[in-house]
Image: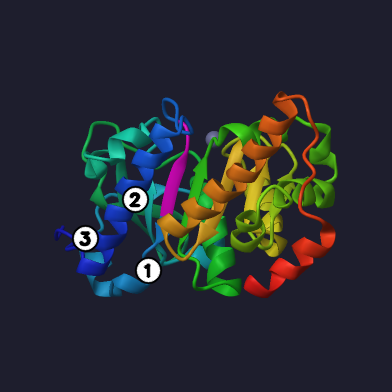
Amino acid sequence: MATLKLPVEVQKELKKVSKVAGYLWQREWAERNAGNISMNLTSFFTKEEVQAAAGEQIPFDFPKGAAGFVIYITGTGCYLRDLVDSLDKVSCILYINEEATAYSIIWGGNRENFGPTCELISHTSIHLFNSINHPENLAVVHTHPLELICMSHHELFDNEEELNRQIWMMCPEVKVFVPKGIHCTPYALSSTADLAKVTIEAFKTRNVSLWEKHGATATAPDVEKAWDFLDVANKGAKLLMMCWAAGFKPAGLSNEQLVELEQFT
Ligand SMILES: [Zn+2]
């Protein structure tokens, strides 16, 4: 088994993972082993390189289209805060075999009983969806943003248009930098194919998938841009809830003002 050499471009992407993981921890969005991050790195490696580095194959029922994918992903039970200085222990790069029936870890995962996150199926399904519909989107970030989770317990969650309007109206940047808005993704059990399915539905129309009573997920060209979607969306939710907590209903940007901002999106 050869050792997989990481190209400079991949090292740069992994540095962004460490940086964003630090942000998530600071923001109290990544308690204990909450959250997971992945990146589709298939285009950075040759088939020969990854096959030479592949060791033991671990059976897994992947969607057929994901055959041959090379995925960076965080580990199950691992703490995201450890990505800051022990990235190779709490995450790995894995190679999905050409039949999509198993994976091998080809880099990282340097600790006992390491395994990829139990959300592997959701992440792989999103990467497959992106490779067909949005090939520029290589990163997926799932975390537990406080105010967005609160919003998923509110009755507004049943009215996606209105939830987005109320979050957008709090500040122009929210409309400009989360232009497609938030999808109110119905509850599904963690780590199931059902959760993967509803999340893909979300990304057909929106920038952020707000998992009911659980957390939020975003996909973007890199991890920092995925973080930005979550950060800005949560800012809108936080401002809205601060107004409610102060006992008043915010005036909000008007519908005309929101339409005017569309020229910047
Ligand atoms: Zn979660």
Instruction: Determine the residue positioned at 38% across, 49% down.
Output: 73
Q: Residue at x 51, y 62 (%)?
A: 220
Whether residues under marks 3 and 1 lie with C-beta atoms below 8 angstroms apart, the answer is no
Task: Identify the disc placed on residue 53.
Answer: 3
Looking at the rendered structure, the kind of residue marked 2 is Val
Cα distance between the residues tagged 2 and 3: 23 Å
Comes first in the chain, label 3 or label 1: 1
Viewer-side residue, 163 vs 68: 163
For badge 3, the amino acid type reads Ala
Measured in 3D between alpha carbons, the distance from the residue under mark 3 to the one under mark 1, in whole angstroms, is 14 Å
The answer to whether one can see residue 214 in this image is: no
On the picture, is 213 further left or further right than 103?
right
Pointer 2 residue: 17
Residue assigned mark 1: 42
Mark 2 surroundings: few (<14), some (14-19) or many (≥20) residues within 10 A:
many
The magenta-colored residue range is: 34-38
* Of the pair 179 and 170, the residue shown nearer to us: 170
Q: Dot 3 surroundings within 10 Å: few (below 14), some, or many (20 or more)?
A: some
Majority secondary structure in the magenta region: strand
Q: Is residue 72 magenta?
A: no
In space, the residues marked 2 and 1 are separated at their CA atoms by 17 Å
Q: Residue 45's image quarter? A: bottom left
Q: Position of residue 20 (x, y in %)?
A: 38, 47
72, above or below 129, in the image: above
Percent from the top left, x then y, of residue 142?
Answer: 51, 44
**Disc 3 beta carbon < 8 A from ligand 1?**
no
Q: Is residue 121 left or right of residue 51?
A: right
Q: Quadrant of residue 130?
A: bottom right
On residue 30, the disc is none
